[in-house]
Image (tube, rainbow, N blue to C red):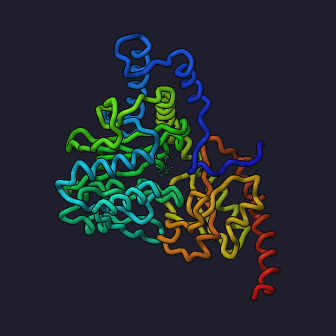
Amino acid sequence: MKLPVYLDNHATTKVDPRVVDTMLPYFSENYGNAASKQHEFGWRAEAAVEKARAQVAALVGALPEEIVFVSGATESVNLALKGVAEAYAFKGNHIVTAKTEHRAVLDTCSRLEKYGFAVTYVPVDNHGTVSPDEIRKAIEEKTVLVSVMFANNEIGTIAPVQEIGARCREAGVIFHTDATQAVGKIPIDVTKMGVDLLSCSAHKMYGPKGIGALYVRKHGPRVRVMSQMDGGGHERGIRSGTLNVPAIVGFGKAAEIAMEEMASDGKRLAILRDKLVDGITAAIESTSVNGHPILRLSHNANITFSGVRADELMMQMKDIAVSSGSACSSASPEPSHVLRAIGLQDRDVLASLRFGLGRFTTEAEIEYAITRIVEIVQVVRKGTQQYQPAQI
Ligand SMILES: *Cc1c(COP(=O)(O)O)cnc(C)c1O
């Protein structure tokens, strides 16, 4: 077993070796510009891009022409929210979203607030679930967009997307979902679920970094987004810029593999995840698991170790790569807004760790992780107890 053990698959995933193999020829031999319409190099690149577009589309039940390639989920979310805000400004200036969204959504919303938009941040229950009825109630005359994430990147809770989609359709409002943690992990059908816009990213599903997609519904209803990047008119004018052909090819391959393997991956990871959670919670007192007990990503576990500081645990635990309950960028020490939103006190937020298993996680790694975490939590708790009297 190679150390450190990687249990941070919500942050990013290893590129599947099959994906790497598929990408390589598009750096060396097939290096054409997909927009070069006059020669063989361009045609080959374009054909590869269109194949990948169909593969990504199939993964979410979309048509190939509804997929716009962008640099990742952050850009996808920015394009969806700002693009709809601009295209539908004539209709209204109100957006509905949830408190537990990724920063990509929350920060884009605060930018839009500076430009005169009003945003309603709907609260979640203590499992992190947003109620479709609360979303419906938040929709007003001036609402142009609802944006609710498919699955949460910290606590793994899966949203009632289909019910939210139905409420939005009923109200005649566009529905966007940040599905970055869900695409390639659980089945998604944009039409059945009433999704109009969907954001995803290849590096969260064993593809390369720097490539993602925005799904834009074309029929029933046709959704418009105003481009946020002007230039050569690539991607039907929605996103200009020379296409990153190797990355797009890799994204397509990752989507194809996910189609075939998500069910078996999901089953295997749920068993390993449960083993990790049971091993930790059985051996360590005062632990609690965050997120929805059933409607959750099978590779996610988020655990609070009461009375222990997560950053201290991680310092002692350099052989296991996990993430703390504080905001995902270590640059900002703000306690996680997600854990706060599900009702945790700040001391518990700062005592929480996120475990993210993935396709390459082995049983031996999980057994190692359990042993080490149990050991380290006990050491750190003892240290804290000895230290506390002196503090008081
Ligand atoms: C990782 C992530 C993003 C950002 O994706 P990038 O491709 O890194 O820009 C957005 N939303 C969620 C839910 C994520 O997990």
Residue 314 in percent (x, y) is at 71, 61
In terms of image quadrants, where is residue 336? bottom right
**Residue in the foreground of this view, choosing between 386 and 242:** 242
Vertical placement of residue 318 versus 352, above or below: above
Q: Nearer the viewer, residue 9 or 273?
A: 9
In the image, taking residue 3 as reference, residue 144 lies left or right, namely left
Q: Residue at x 79, y 64 (%)?
A: 375
Task: Judge whether residue 64 can be spotted in this image.
Answer: no
Q: To which quarter of the image does residue 147 belong?
A: bottom left
Residue at left 59%, top 24%? 21
Residue 296 vs 191, above or below: the answer is below
List the single residue furthest toward the bottom: 392
Q: Position of residue 44 (x, y in %)?
A: 43, 16
Toward which corner of the image does residue 286 lie, by quadrant?
bottom right
Residue at screen point 45% across, 46% down: 73
Name the residue at 60% across, 45% down: 358
Quarter of the image where the N terminus is located: top right
Q: Residue 79: x, y in percent? A: 35, 46
Q: Looking at the figure, which quarter contains the C terminus?
A: bottom right
- How many numbered circles does the render carry? 0
Left-right relation of 390 to 45: right
Pick the front one: 41 or 25? 41
Where residue 211 sits in the image (x, y, percent)? Answer: 48, 37
Query: Of residues 108 and 287, which is closer to you in this image?
Result: 108
The answer to whether residue 361 of the structure is visible from this angle is yes
